Image (cartoon, rainbow, N blue to C red):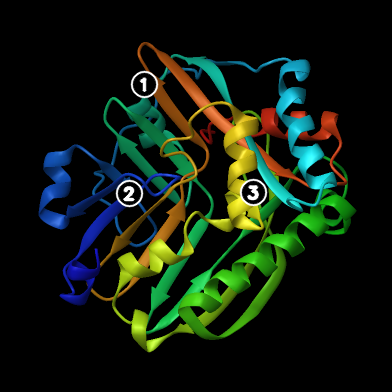
Amino acid sequence: MDELSLQKVPYFFIIDFLGENVEVFKESDIKESGLLIDFQNFSNVEKVSELNKKVEWISFPETQESFEKGFNEVQKNIRLGNSYLVNYTRKTKIETNLTLEEIFYHSNAKYKVFYKDFFVFFSPETFVKIIDGKILTYPMKGTIDASLDNAAEILKNDKKEKAEHYTVVDLLRNDLSMVADDVKVDKFQYIDFIKTQQKDLFAMSSEISGFIKPEFNGKVGSIMKTLLPAGSILGAPKPKTLEIILSAEGYTRGYYTGVCGWFDGKSLDSCVMIRFIEKEGNNLYFKSGGGITHMSKLEDEYQEMKNKIYVPIH
């Protein structure tokens, strides 16, 4: 990745959660790979016809008791001081009359990727952007059902969600400081609206920026290696929290919560691979979760995990 970005060669990359698998596609290779990509500033998708069938969508979430086992392990570690924010995720079987490709074409999101016979995601979350030597990140933490009265205000003032958001902003600010100078929070706690067929959501984000240090200039691979895993889907402090996640979740995230991005020869746009559906054999699984702090309530976190099992087709 460093070699290509230093040579200003455009490419698309996909990195899994643990940074163990990295796939890089030059622009000329994307078509052969069968990847379909739809980002804000890059797309290889042709216009598609309307979806002419009613969407069928059933999810089979685990029981609250099953969810609670890992939740309790996370809470125990938080009480022991091993972590103060853990992003706890689960894997839920789903059934739908849509193919992964149809989900890709007809869902609405900032970032969409379809990887043939493997996965599709429709992510609202930017990871980092690099424009003219400036690096920006947009941690998203905190969601609420948008149909509630004064939902946006409730989200902004919710003690638990606020604490979670402050923690992630602080973490990302520290992470960015490893690769950039003059790091600052430009926008704090702004609200995004996410429309879906199941329910509408509000999500809370912030914007952090800095100027890339000379030793990282043009080295997209080195920047990614330093910043990953993404703080918003891991927690803090990172090394110990990763240990907790691997033990508590009991399944392999794979590419879910990894990152992918498009480097156009000058600028980079990348996203966190959330809102993620993976094919395993003949079954489809939706991976979702949320941040756990010492203030988290089991029922609320279980509900949030289920709320996120949606497809943004409307």
Q: Is residue 242 left or right of residue 189?
A: left
Q: Nearer the viewer, mark 2 or mark 3?
A: 3
Circle 1: element type: loop
Give the CA separation, mark 1 to mark 2. 22 Å
The total number of labels drawn is 3
- Could you say which quadrant of the image residue 88 lies in? top right
Note whether 154 is above or below 168 in the view shown: above
- CB atoms of marks 3 and 1 within 8 Å: no
Q: Amino acid at mark 3?
A: Thr
Marks 2 and 3, how far apart at CA: 23 Å
Q: Which mark, residue 14?
A: 2
Query: Which quadrant would residue 221 be assigned to in this image?
Result: bottom left
Q: Earlier in the sequence, mark 3 or mark 1?
A: 1
Q: Which residue is mark 1?
A: 99
Q: Residue at x 21, y 60 (%)?
A: 11
Q: Position of residue 192 (x, y in %)?
A: 65, 56
Q: Position of residue 177 (x, y in %)?
A: 55, 78
Q: Nearer the viewer, residue 213 or 304?
A: 213
On the image, the x and y values in percent for residue 157 come to: 88, 58
Q: Regarding mark 3 in the picture, which secondary structure is present there? A: helix
The residue beneath circle 3 is: 241
